[in-house]
Image (cartoon, helix red, strand yellow):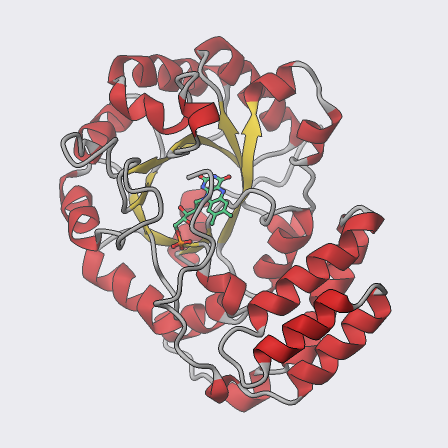
């Protein structure tokens, strides 16, 4: 089958704001939703190369997408180069625009096997995997890493050089070491240093909470793009605004802050692309996140989590969002929020 593929670097030049992969969140529905709200590039959550090898139904479902999402990266993880390379071929045949390899996952189950961020401790093994994967496919291959394994092994610069040798298209860096997990702050000074020394494009990532911050981080780090994860779970307009600030367009705020209309769109995407029994759960999750920092949010959350019926959840949420404007949102960036994940 032939696909109308879009090269991720071309897309990045037009819009450098990338939706970070998030397990259990950046599924088909959410990627389409964020793409419609101006994310430049989207990536699936991490997909197990072994799962692809065994044709696991659940694994294969993680790669579901539609044409509106291009360019779409399918993120793979694994420890054996041949199995990852084979999984990359399957993802390519499935229509991915690029393959993203996960070298950032700090989760013990993954690291114990030598996959995810464990590769940061074994650059020869990483090289073998990059070489095998780049050879196996025609589409671009990117990687996502952390700054290093721990404070004594911050080797993102070496990784970028190695990745450049192996024909990798970009390196995305979550600005924390594996040892830090999600504690502390992402180290953008180090990301900036890596960008200066890297022979290939670098994308910075970590703790971007507002559109202005996204644009400022992009400019001050000199990175070729930025990845935004948790920030867009509190503010669905983050990409929309960042793209407009970056491209010099005005933000006609009131006109574009149709929270309830946007939430209805999310509901439509969930209905189209989510398993029916999950629609209600997802809807509550997003309603709770998006209400963060608005007056009455905690009472609203209590109410929707008691609701059993999807339509009731939707109605309650729409009426809550009808009553707010973006100007009311408190700064909640210092609160702990989703302090764990696969990258
Ligand atoms: C719930 C959750 C799941 C995540 N899953 C993945 C994943 O599947 N693959 C990956 O590379 N990173 C994953 N991450 C890491 C994010 O892509 C990102 O690097 C991290 O959240 C820091 O960026 P942020 O501060 O903008 O959220 C996950 C993060 C969270 C919070």
**Is residue 31 in sight in this rendering?**
yes
Q: Position of residue 59 (x, y in %)?
A: 67, 28
- Which residue shows up at 33% across the image and 18% down it? 126
Quadrant of the frame with the N terminus: top right
Residue 67 vs residue 137: left or right?
A: right
- Which residue shows up at 36% across the image and 62% down it? 208
Residue 41 vs residue 277: left or right?
A: left
Q: Position of residue 179 (x, y in %)?
A: 28, 36
Quarter of the image for residue 13 reads bottom left
- Which residue shows up at 35% across the image and 54% down it? 226
Q: Position of residue 259 (x, y in %)?
A: 63, 79
* Numbered circles on residues, count: 0
113 over 186 or under it: above or below: above
* Depth order, front residue of 214/155: 155
* Depth order, front residue of 282/222: 282
* Depth order, front residue of 41/31: 31
3 over 49 or under it: above or below: below
Q: Position of residue 192 (x, y in %)?
A: 18, 50
**Is residue 252 in sight in this rendering?**
no
- Which residue shows up at 47% across the image and 54% down it? 338
* Depth order, front residue of 164/46: 46
72 over 51 or under it: above or below: below
Quadrant of the frame with the C terminus: top left
253 over 332 or under it: above or below: below
Quarter of the image for residue 141 reads top left
Residue 10 vs residue 207: left or right?
A: right
């Amino acid at each position: 089958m032939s696909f109308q593929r879009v090269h991720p670097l071309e897309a990045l030049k037009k819009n450098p704001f990338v939706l970070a992969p998030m397990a259990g969140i950046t599924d088909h529905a959410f990627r389409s939703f964020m793409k419609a709200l101006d994310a430049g590039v989207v990536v699936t959550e991490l997909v197990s190369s072994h799962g692809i090898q065994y044709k696991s139904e659940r694994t294969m479902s993680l790669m579901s997408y539609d044409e509106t999402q291009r360019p779409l990266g399918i993120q793979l993880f694994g420890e054996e180069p041949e199995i990852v390379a084979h999984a990359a071929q399957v993802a390519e045949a499935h229509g991915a625009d690029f393959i993203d390899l996960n070298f950032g996952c700090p989760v013990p189950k993954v690291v114990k096997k030598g996959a995810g961020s464990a590769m940061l401790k074994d650059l020869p093994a990483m090289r073998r995997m990059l070489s095998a994967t780049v050879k196996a496919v025609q589409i671009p291959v990117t990687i996502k890493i952390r700054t290093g394994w721990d404070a004594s092994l911050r080797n993102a610069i070496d990784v970028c050089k190695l990745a450049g040798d192996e024909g990798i298209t970009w390196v995305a860096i979550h600005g924390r070491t594996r040892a830090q997990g999600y504690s502390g702050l992402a180290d953008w000074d180090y990301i900036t240093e890596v960008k200066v020394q890297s022979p290939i494009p670098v994308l910075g990532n970590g703790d971007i909470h507002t559109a202005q911050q996204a644009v400022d981080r992009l400019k001050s780090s000199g990175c070729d793009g930025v990845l935004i994860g948790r920030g867009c779970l509190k503010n669905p307009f983050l990409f929309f605004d960042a793209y407009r600030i970056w491209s010099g367009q005005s933000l006609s705020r009131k006109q574009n802050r149709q929270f309830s209309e946007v939430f209805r769109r999310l509901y439509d995407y969930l209905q189209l692309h989510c398993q029916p029994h999950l629609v209600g759960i997802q809807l509550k999750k997003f309603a709770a996140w998006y209400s963060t920092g608005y007056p009455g949010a905690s009472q609203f959350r209590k109410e929707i989590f008691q609701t059993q019926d999807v339509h009731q959840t939707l109605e309650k949420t729409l009426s809550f969002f009808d009553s707010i404007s973006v100007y009311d949102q408190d700064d909640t960036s210092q609160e702990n929020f989703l302090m764990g994940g696969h990258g």
